[in-house]
Each structure stands twice: as structure tokens, then as C-alpha cells.
Amino acid sequence: MLAERIVRLAHNYPNHIALTGSDSQAITYAELAKRIISISDFLKSRGINRDSRIAIVLPKTIDAVVSILAINHIGASYVPIDVQQPTSRIQQVLRDCDPNALISEVGC
């Protein structure tokens, strides 16, 4: 899986830039791997597993990419929710997908 490959790259190229956001914020492979593992460990501690669906309600930022990769690391499914949609649409998507968890903020 992609997340495992990134963790391996972090060992070989820890200080190379892995992601650059639209705001020019950048993180290295080492930082990316650390954040992927941190978020996936947190999700697993909350009972998230391969059969889980996690909704992601975040703007298109590095945090969103890290969250997707952390979910991928677990082997779970993610449902991206466009934060620019009307609240009623977001609520409808959340009802339809019935997620096991929702990520709306990343604090790592």
C-alpha cells in the first residue's frame, strides 16, 4: 500500500520534501511518516479497522492528504466530504455513508 511505501521512503530520504501544500507549506518524508503513523494509531485505538468507513471533512490541504494516507495505512475506506458543499448536502452524504468515524481536524 502507498502508506507503507511512504514509511519506507522516510527511512531512506527522511529530509526530502514529500508534500507541498497550496500555501507553500511543506513536510518531509520523515514528518509525513510520523503523522501517518500517529493518526492511524489514534484511529486504531478508537476501534477503527479494515472494515471501517471514515469520513474526511477537511479542506484540500496537507492534513487531508495525511488523513487519507493514515486511513490507507489501516486498510479502511475513506469518504471525502467537500467542505464547500452546503451543510444539508454534507449531512446527506454522512447519513448515506454511515461512517464509523469522522475526521474534521488534525492535531498532530
Image: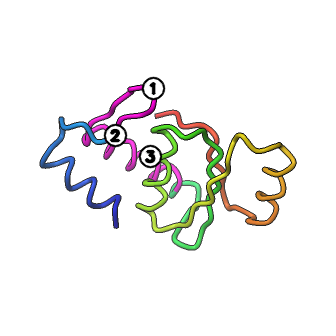
Label disc, if present, on residue 42 of the rendered structure? none
List x then y, in percent, for residue 7. Answer: 26, 53
Total numbered badges shown on the rendered structure: 3
Sequence order check, earlier mark of 3 and 2: 2
Above or below, comparing residue 74 to residue 65 in the picture: below
- Report the amino acid beneath label 2: Leu
Q: Alpha-carbon neighbours of circle 2 within 10 Å: few (<14), some, or many (≥20)?
A: some
Q: Nearer the viewer, residue 108 or 18?
A: 18
Q: Residue furthest right?
A: 88
Residue 37 covered by magenta stretch: yes
* Residue on which the image places disc 2: 19
Look at the image and give the residue range highlighted in magenta: 19-43
Q: Nearer the viewer, mark 3 or mark 1?
A: 1
Element type where label 3 sits in the image = helix
Q: Secondary structure at mark 1?
A: loop
* Relative to 34, residue 54 above or below: below
> Residue sitting at 52 percent across and 33 percent down?
107
Amino acid carrying mark 1 in the image: Asp
Q: Is residue 38 left or right of residue 83?
A: left
Do the residues under discs 3 and 2 have CB atoms within 8 angstroms? yes
Task: Report crowding for label 1: few under 14, some 14 to 19, many 20 or more residues within 10 A (C-alpha).
Answer: few
The CA span between labels 2 and 1 is 11 Å
Measured as percent of width and height from the top left, residue 43 is found at: 53, 53
Residue 18 lies, in percent from the top left, at 28, 42
Main secondary-structure element of the magenta-colored stretch: helix
Which residue is the site of mark 3? Answer: 66
The type of residue carrying mark 3 is Val
- Horizontal placement of 55 versus 76: left or right? right
Q: Which residue was labeled with disc 1?
A: 23
Mark 2 residue element: strand
Residue at (62% x, 50% y) in the render: 56
